[in-house]
Structures are given as C-alpha cells and as structure tokens.
Amino acid sequence: MANPDIIKDFPRVPADIVRRAASLQPAILADVAGRRGALSGRIRPLDPGMKLAGTAFTVEVRPGDNLMIHAAISLAKPGDVLVIDGKGDLSAALMGTIMMTACRQLDIAGVVIDGAARDTTEIIDMGYPVFAAGANPNGPTKNVPGRIGHPVSVGGVTVHPGDFIIGDADGVVVVEREKIEGLLPAAEKKVRDEAARIAAIQAGDTAATWLTAALRSAGALKEGEAL
C-alpha cells in the first residue's frame, strides 16, 4: 500500500511553458499575478548571480531533519526545483555540497529552502542555484519522517507540487500551475511597456503622468492643487 505522505507523481507545468516563463523576471510575474506569490525576502540566493526556474517538487521536514530531502532527491524529475518547508529553522543546515552535487547531477533545476544551508562557498563555486533563509555549519539529523508532494508553506506562501517557481537576485516567486500559461501574454506585454517607458525616461520624459491623480485620490493634494 502506497504511503499517503509520499506523492511521487503530480501534474507539472509543461516544459515549453517553463522555458517561456523562465525568460521573464520574477518581479514581472509577481506584478501580473496581482503582486502576490513572492516568498519572504528572507529567502535569498546564496549568491546574487544565481537564477532558477522550474516546477515545484515540494518537501516538508521537521526542523533540522533532512531525511525526506534525501528521498525527494531520488524521486524528483529533471527540471524540478526542490521547494523545502524547513519551518524557517536556522539552527542546523538541511543541505550542503554533497546533496547539491547530487541535485545537479540529476538535473534538478535548483533548491529553495525555508531553512538553512551550509558549505555555501563551495555551492557558490559550483554555480548551483540555491535560495535559503540562512546558513549554519551544524549538520542535520536523518531521523524524522515528513511529507513529499503535498502543499507546503515556504516564505509565507503556499506552494503546490507542480507550480512554477522562478528566482533571481530579487528573490523567489511562485505562480500556480493552472495560472502561469494564462499570465504569460500580460507578462510579455509588461516587459515591452517597461522597456518603452525606460527609453522615454532616458530621452527626458521623466514625468509620471499618473502621479497627480493618485496624490489627489490619496488626499495628499486637494482638487486643483499640483506639486
């Protein structure tokens, strides 16, 4: 009988949609998703140059125990991102160089940990994308069962298995599997619109046309007043 705490198979964002979405900034996707989906800013890349994009392979562990992460590494598919609910605990690292090397060897697209990592200099030298809430040299235990393939809470955001995950120097954004494809046209339009606006600013058009109306709406200016 299958263990209900370990769900091995679930729908994922199709690979062509992942590739298309991966070309966008997390900030753009968060904007078109209603300014939501961004994990807490405490979850940061180990190095600002790190980027990741893929489908969420979710793992829930007890604080300081990485038993289920080892199981997840053996079950994840190429292109998955391990998304680990470590309860925000920073008293012990959940992953280090050995596990990250295995992830890279298996074409796992990256790791997001609401918890700590270690061997950070070596991981940065590897160039493998890891986003974590912190670092700690203490090693983990491997004693306590957890869950794989269930919804998790990471950085204050619910992540379902198969959701789209993307991260860069700004942080990590999750978009629901069912919504990512439908958001791409608006995201791509926003990229074009922002590029046009930056070009206009560089040409001298620095005025924000919406500002006066917004100030009046907020009560900062009275009708007829201007900055």
Image (cartoon, rainbow, N blue to C red):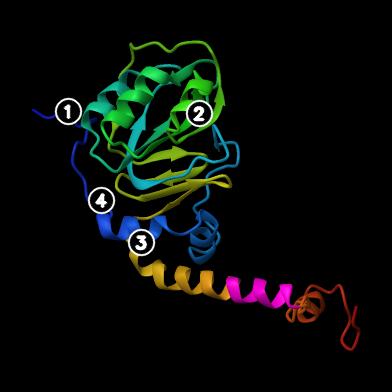
Dot 3 or dot 4, earlier in sequence: 4
Given this view, does label 1 or label 4 mark the residue nearer the observer? 4
- Looking at numbered disc 3 in the image, what kind of residue is underneath it? Arg
Residue 120 placed where, x, y %?
A: 52, 23
Q: Give the range drawn in magenta.
A: 195-203
Q: Mark 4 points at which residue?
A: 12
Query: 184 left or right of 155?
Result: left
Cα separation, mark 3 vs mark 2, equals 26 Å
Circle 1 crowding by C-alpha within 10 Å: few under 14, some 14–19, many from 20: few
The numbered mark at residue 20 is 3
Q: Mark 1 points at which residue?
A: 3
Q: Name the residue under label 2.
A: 124
Q: Is residue 7 above or below residue 23?
A: above
Circle 3 crowding by C-alpha within 10 Å: few under 14, some 14–19, many from 20: few
Cα separation, mark 1 vs mark 4, equals 21 Å
Asked if the residue under mark 4 is in contact with the one under mark 3, i.e. CB atoms within 8 Å, the reply is no
Dot 3 or dot 2, earlier in sequence: 3
